[in-house]
Amino acid sequence: MRAGRVAGGTGIVLLGALAVVAAVGPWLLGTDGRERVARPYAPPSAEHWLGADDLGRDLFAQLVIGARGSLGIALLVAVAATTVAALVGGLAGLVPPWASALVMRSVDLILALPFLPLLILAAAFLGPSLGVRAVVVAALLWAGPARLVRAGVLAAWSRGHLQAARAMGASAWYLLWRHASPVVAPLLVPVFVRAAMTAIVLDASLAFLGLGDPTLPSWGTMIHWASVRGAMLTDAWLWWALPPGLAIVATVTALALVGVATEDRLNPTLRQAR
Amino acid sequence: MLTVTDLTVVYPTGQPAARGVDLTVAAGEIVALAGETGSGKSTVAKALLGLLPAGSTVTGSARLDDVELVDRTGRDWYGIRGSRIGIVPQGAMTGLNPVRRVGDQLVEIVRLHTGASRPAAIARTVDLLGRVRLPAATAHAYPHQLSGGQRQRVAIALALAGEPRLVVADEPTTGLDLVTQNHLLDLLVDLRTRSQVGMLIISHDLPALRGVADRIAVMYAGTLVESGPATGAAHHPYTRGLLAATPSLRRDVAWTSIPGTAPARAELTPGCSFAARCPWTSGTCHTDRPSPVALGPAVVTCHQPSADRPLLFPTVAVPPAPAVPPAQGRQPASPDPGAGHGGTRSPEADHGGPRAGSGAPVAVLTGVGHVYRSRHRRTTALAGVDLRLSPGTILGVVGESGSGKSTLGQILLGLLRPTTGRVEVAGTDLSPLRGRRLRAVRHRLGFVAQDPYTTLHPAMPVADLVAEPLRIAGVPARLHPDRVRRALHLAGAPADLLDSRPDQLSGGQRQRVAIARALVGEPVLLIADEATSMLDVSTRAGIASTLRHLADTIGLAVLFITHDLGEAVQACDRIVVLHEGVPVQQGPPRDVIDRPRPGYPADLVAAAHRHLGPDPVG
């Protein structure tokens, strides 16, 4: 319990710091990360903390601006995937068995799809804009959580107080709103966190493969250019590829810590076990 | 053989769970340790077996022959647990390994304790099964193929596998139907007589134990309040209250409740822990802790023990039958002023007299049947039920689990559509109704569920909980507070509960809140589905007397679903006995008890008589 709280606190502090950097960082920079401000392949210096890329663009500025893209897509995808999961899963827990079976089989179908190849195809054909990528990732991520939500609704259904309300003549909407949602809503927190996490990793993978938006700096794109422009052959990878990699790791770790901590708090059996 | 002296257990949380317990069990003796939830009876058993949670402190002594049981850890228990002390743990019938044959599980334990070769162990297993009166073929069965009673026998055989000197059985009959319970208790007596093992049976069911045990020890709030021969008279007010709280099959024997609730744990009060609920308290009870006093063969921890002083606990108002004098030693049924439910009922009501017939029936069931259908089989839950519920009367539905009695409640609420028959509630035929109009019927019914711990939303305060039916029925919010207060009053719940949340209430209080919630919509019919079965014995009669009061004062019709025949006899005007979904007998309680139909009703009445044991002397 103690350790869980420390982990959760660390995660929240880390996420908060990243969010602040993403929100205000770009305003404090003297450049938008797309213009030439230094000698190409410049090593780190007092003026350019992480040096410059092959076009003489400031890498530190790209790192700060990239936080926006990564956190932005995480937020978009998490909101979309959680909403869809809650709606579809909730509905599947309420409708008659045959309709529920229909929904759950389509969920199985989506779960069976190979994620990355499909994403690559979608990114290649639909274009690299932020919105499109978010929609595609979210469309793949809602399926697993929808199952979880459905199970939660079914479990809530057998609760004594919900059955009592049913015996009082409550309608399905009343039951869902007053009795089932307080049981199911806490399930959505870890769902949200996990979706955000997966979104960042998937998006970075796409960008690394060169399918990111080339006009906007992002962590994935930075690693992509570092590898394409030969930074990996020299010492340049230390200030070109490593910082965005570490940033991705830090963000995902922070989200994972928050996710585990919330899950611990919400799951009474886990709470007892620790 | 087993001698426990001054045993005190403190849980890791710092809460004392048992204090200064003295207990002996001789070879070939059955000692029953009785008490309600939280009395510390299971704690004592766990202390004897070294099964307390880590970090608990045990002081005092418990010696089995020449072996000290207190202060043993881990490996010290080898050669004692299972071989000197056999254990029938609580819920043992559900604790068997579901994926292994019964015989294999027995062989494993036999070999563990005796180190016998496999063939020898198999022979011994057959012998063990014979001792618990199971056919040898049972060894090839998986636990799910056996009935609850058979599985409990297997659990007893497992406890006997190491040839123990002492068997400790924690609630061995709980959850089984009456007939099976009696068979199991007979088996325990028989085992004791034949193999001279000592037995410590832990149970909340004091009356049933009086029939089988040699001596009885009663615990309350962590202390032993009384111990003595099972056939002797009870002297402690709590023991006597507990006996009187068990509904008798005779309506002239009063059914009482003990007011208040037991402290959750053995709190360190300066005086007697029972003083707050005791009808005989005097000054010293609140200030001085009583010490055990020997009264003949019995030992009583009370300042003023008495076997014949009237108890003056609230009783369920049942008219004393004029022809029969009150039972010896039990006080006559007198409406207790403290309970406030002094309503009496005309004796004619017993026979469906004027009031039962007066007014239009609130619910009529004609030829109702229900069949559950799954992919592979059809299960008949109900068949040919004809019922008529009238205002001001309480109709009891009695049956064991699986008899269809809860299905009946669901059908009346319109939550389940019967496969055959016609249900009419408040003059409306339910069968053509759907959706909103069906739900509107439920606004006129009240439902009290079995489990007061899950039926109340844990996050809602009492005021909101009770008002919920009004919110659902769309009653304007300004009318809620008044009606909530009135409902709480009718249900016998104190009005200062309004802001509490369910986890701050005792089981009895929760059930009263649930009853208030069922009453707030001013229903014509209240359906109480096993509303008392999860409550402590000492508080059940209180709930029943509240229902009686409601029937008498506001003319409520009540469907009282229960598995306890005695409770139905005491609480109801008419009884329907359900067996495998079929109403096998219907009539006033006295007819059912005195002239049960041959077959199931006769067996049930006989088992209930047997279960209640000899007429209580307390």
Image (tube, coloured by chain):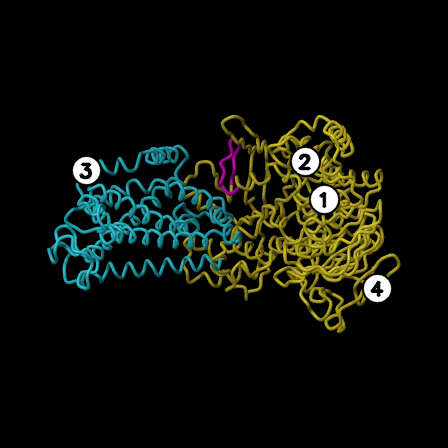
Chain colours: A cyan, B yellow
Please state the chain letter of the residue tagged with numbered disc 2 in the rendered image: B
Query: Which residue of the protein is positioned furthest toward the left in this rendering?
Result: A36
Q: CA distance from mark 2 to mark 4?
A: 41 Å
Image quadrant where residue B470 sits: bottom left
Mark before the other along the chain sequence, 2 or 4: 2
Labels 1 and 4 share a subunit: yes
**Residue for badge 1:** B87
Residue type at mark 4 is Val
Spot occupied by residue B313 in the image (x, y as percentages of width and height): 72, 61
Residue B242 x, y percent position in the rendering? 73, 55
| Mark sitting on residue A124 | 3
The answer to whether residue B591 is visible is: yes
The verdict on residue A13 being magenta is no
Residue range highlighted in magenta: B412-424
Do the residues bearing badges 2 and 3 touch, measured as CB atoms within 8 Å?
no
Q: CA distance from mark 1 to mark 4?
A: 32 Å
**Residues beneath discs 2 and 1 located on the same chain:** yes
Residue type at numbered disc 3: Ala
Q: How many marks?
A: 4
Task: Identify which residue is drawn at 39% across, 36% down.
Answer: A100
Q: Please check whether the numbered discs 2 and 3 fall on a single chain.
A: no
Tell me which label, 2 or 1, sits earlier in the chain: 1
Chain letter for the residue marked with disc 4 in the picture: B
Q: In the rendered structure, the residue with mark 3 lies on which chain?
A: A
SS at mark 2?
helix
Q: Is B394 above or below relative to B335?
A: above
Give residue B51's position: percent from left, percent from top.
Answer: 67, 51
The earlier-in-sequence mark between 1 and 4 is 1
Which residue is labeled 4 in the image? B293
Q: Are marks 2 and 4 on the same chain?
A: yes
Q: Report the residue marked by disc 2.
A: B151
